[in-house]
Image (spheres, rainbow, N blue to C red):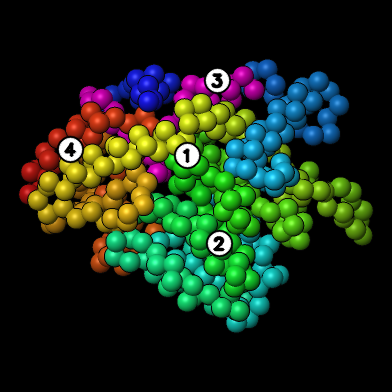
Amino acid sequence: MLDINQIRNDFPILQQTVNGKPLVYFDNAATTQKPMQVIDRMSRYYKNENSNVHRGVHYLSQVATEAYEASRTYIANYIHASDPSEIVFTRGTTESINLVASVFESFIKEEDEIVITSMEHHSNLVPWQQLCFRTGARLVVVKASVDGELDTREFEKALNDKTRLVAIAHISNVLGTINPVKEITRLAHAAGSVVVIDGAQAIAHLPVNVADIDCEFYAFSGHKTYAPMGIGVLYGKKKWLEKLSPYQYGGEMIESVRFDKTIFNSLPYKFEAGTPNVAGALGLEEAMRYIAGFGVDEIKQYEDKLMDYATGELKKLEGMQIIGTAKQKAAVISFVIEGIHAYDLGTLLDKMGVALRTGNHCAQPLVESYGLTSTVRISLAMYNTLEEIDIFMGALQKAVSMLR
């Protein structure tokens, strides 16, 4: 059992009031809050260890380099990568996916196919769309059911000998659907395709084992994992990272430079041009240690309890439509209420101290497939409580009565 009071005490931002009301923070799919353990680790780096990493012979550079590479090793072990060199630090999921889309261009030719799903975030849609525009390849979209589920048989039908890459979200940021990524990876491999997984919504809420999934690439962000903004990870199988050319050029990613020739650095450094976000990497390691301390399975069970309770309460409201009712879901609930605009609800709820998200959630094609332009979304985390759901429901009922 998680000690929720102790967890909440670790997050100072949760202690504040908004518009005179206790903050109820239900916008965790956009970004999670940060515990003091993460804040203190980053502060300690800037107070005691701050230096540029690699190649420095002085004490602080050695200390910072050791800590930075230890973070890489911890994260590799956390997601069951076979080697720390398979962990590339980026600014986040978006950059990680764009990195793959950029350097993979040499493997895509006209009439090849890239397969995605209808539930992708723009960050896992637009890079592949643009890659198809540049190369003449075809973007194939596998549509989710009205419930928000993928039929693996339909997915298999979309695959053929032209399929070069499959890109899919582990968890939908709108529907909360947990996709069967291991089975989809198996099907993709049978068709000879590479698999890229957007793990932004999964890494803090599910056990992630890239060796078991067997995907070629897995991307996630720190800021959705109780870690700072501006840090993320691209996991890539070593054999693929070795094949691919660098994404950016500059310092750190080179082994030697002449005016007529450059030899690129070894993995993973050839993909990490420029001064890295050392404090962010240390913060990300600390955040993942924080999650591991409670157990991600225990966190998932608690968040499922919150989601089930919130779903049951929402269904009691007249005119309520929950968008996405897959059997396997994470604690993300999108909804609309008949006759009331999502933005109006979000604005009034903010006045009552409830932070949530409205709009198309950077998944415009998915939301529009339901005949909508926007939804209200609540997304829950391990520091949320049943009592907060009750507060939210009271505020929501008040907002609905005002708008009606």
> Which comes sooner in the sequence, label 3 or label 2?
3
Q: Position of residue 117 (x, y in %)?
A: 44, 66
**Image height of 260 relative to 16, above or below:** below
The residue labelled by disc 3 is 40
User: Helix, strand or loop at disc 3?
Assistant: helix
Q: Is residue 263 left or right of residue 35?
A: right
Give the label on residue 348, or none.
Answer: none
- Crowd class of label 2 (few under 14; some 14 to 19; many from 20; radius 10 Å): many
Q: Quadrant of residue 191?
A: bottom right
Q: What residue span does the magenta drawing correspond to?
A: 19-45
Q: Nearer the viewer, residue 283 or 304?
A: 304
The residue labelled by disc 2 is 185
> Which comes sooner in the sequence, label 3 or label 1?
3
The residue labelled by disc 4 is 393
Contact between marks 4 and 3 (CB within 8 A): the answer is no
Determine the CA span between mark 1 and mark 4.
25 Å
- Numbered label tally: 4
Determine the CA span between mark 3 and mark 2.
39 Å
Contact between marks 3 and 1 (CB within 8 A): the answer is no
Please identify, in this view, whether the residue under mark 1 or under mark 4 is nearer the observer.
1
Magenta-drawn stretch contains 25 = yes
> Which comes sooner in the sequence, label 1 or label 4?
1
x 29%, y 61%: residue = 147
